[in-house]
Amino acid sequence: MYDVIVVGARCAGSPAAMLFARQGYRVLLLEKAQFPQDKLSSHYIHQPGVALLGKWGLLDDLRQAGCRPIDRISYQSPGVRLAGSSLPVDGHRITYAPRRFVLDPILAAGAVAAGAEFRDNCTVGGLLFEEGRVAGVRCRTPGGAETTERAHLVVGADGMRSLVARETKAEAVIEDPRMTCTYYSYWEGVPAHFEQYEGPGRWVGALPTNADLALVMTYFPQSEFHKVRSDVEPAYLEAVRTTAPELYERISAGRRVEQLYGTGHQENFFRKACGPGWVLIGDAVHHKDSIAARGITDAFVQADLLTGHIGDRLHDETALKRALNRYESDLDKHFYEFYRSTLKVAELKPTDERTAFLRSLVGDQTLIDRYFSTLSGACSLEDFYNDELLTALDRS
């Protein structure tokens, strides 16, 4: 009998397992993949996520894995260019964009070091239900044996297509259509910082990652998915050439070292977050278009919120229910506003009004950095729209 079973050992599950184990609970962490294994990802960890890695004692492990530090961000669209950095969070201004076959094993190792039992290459086939609540999981070992494990709380950190969500009938409480499709690859000999380029119907991003490689991502409207995927490479290169010409020159002088990866299945939703004996975190509970590159950071924040609310009250049913309800409420408070702004960007329709607004920030580095802080999560949109900004808008 475990106190907590966490299904999924990626960016939400492993930190949650680690934090529950540090609170003294007996934790089982299950992962269907065999680590290390890559996955589709935009890689970037914003300042709040880096601050949590520092708080958890895992940041040095990430640095030692050869992940290049990022100290600058830029945004460019027709008529405006901004460059700066987000404000620091708990003293952390440098960011990182690790490959997932690097990051995820570090997170899982942190859970193991805290005392969690970790089983990768282990597939969860269903949940156990007893007296109206989730009571555990049914899973298959790497050798093919069926086993049953019981726990007081099952945490579904098993991604956008979560089995835990499906089995508990956790319906979407907010849902929006798919907005974009994305394709990306890795380039050698291409210097980069965290770069964003916006144009009509296109978005391009670049950033440095492990092994001195640069990740270059392209975004297209969802309506073009079938056309783009039928002939990906020309569409990818043309998107970079027309949207980010200077970046195109850099990749032309470099070399693509991996295949093109991509997806058109970028769902946008919030699900019902919890119920008797279960709770969802990470992409299982909330997913938005990856154009904001906030998935990893948001997963870290959710793991921290959930375990913080529960604390030492896991076995007090009344207190646990209150804690899970507070966590569910926090999802709206922390993520809904940015969810809506992300979908607006994912329309891939830059407006004259937005260009004029961004142009009004040019020349004021404090405001530029505060704007980038709204993208990282270091500053709320409400705090961004202060008197200083309103004065700058009046001047423009």
Image: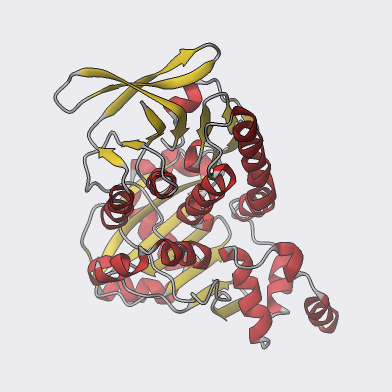
| Above or below, 31 relative to 359 | above
Q: In this figure, what is the number of numbered marks?
A: 0
Q: For the N terminus, give its image quadrant.
A: top left
Closer to us: 383 or 14: 14
Image quarter of the C terminus: bottom right
Hey, which residue is sitting farthest top in the picture? 131
Answer with left or right where residue 266 lies relative to residue 325: left
Question: In the rendered view, does 384 fall on the left or right side of 260?
Answer: right
Q: Is residue 13 visible?
A: yes
> In the image, residue 84 lies at what x, y percent?
55, 81
Which residue shows up at 51% across the image and 52% down it?
A: 304
**Is residue 239 or residue 159 the one in the foreground?**
159
Q: Which x, y percent locates residue 361?
A: 70, 80
Give me the residue at 26% from left, 76% from top.
Answer: 253
From the top left corner, tell me how far across and down residue 372 is, in percent.
Answer: 59, 71
- Residue at x-position 55% and y-position 71%: 89
The residue under the point 39% across, 58% down is: 43
Quadrant of the rendered image containing residue 192: bottom left
Vertical placement of residue 261 versus 34, above or below: below
Is residue 201 shown left or right of residue 58? right
**Outermost residue to the bottom:** 363
Residue 200, position as x, y percentages in the image? 58, 59
Whether 34 is drawn above or below 92: the answer is: above
Q: Nearer the viewer, residue 220 or 336?
A: 336
Give the image quarter of residue 238: bottom left
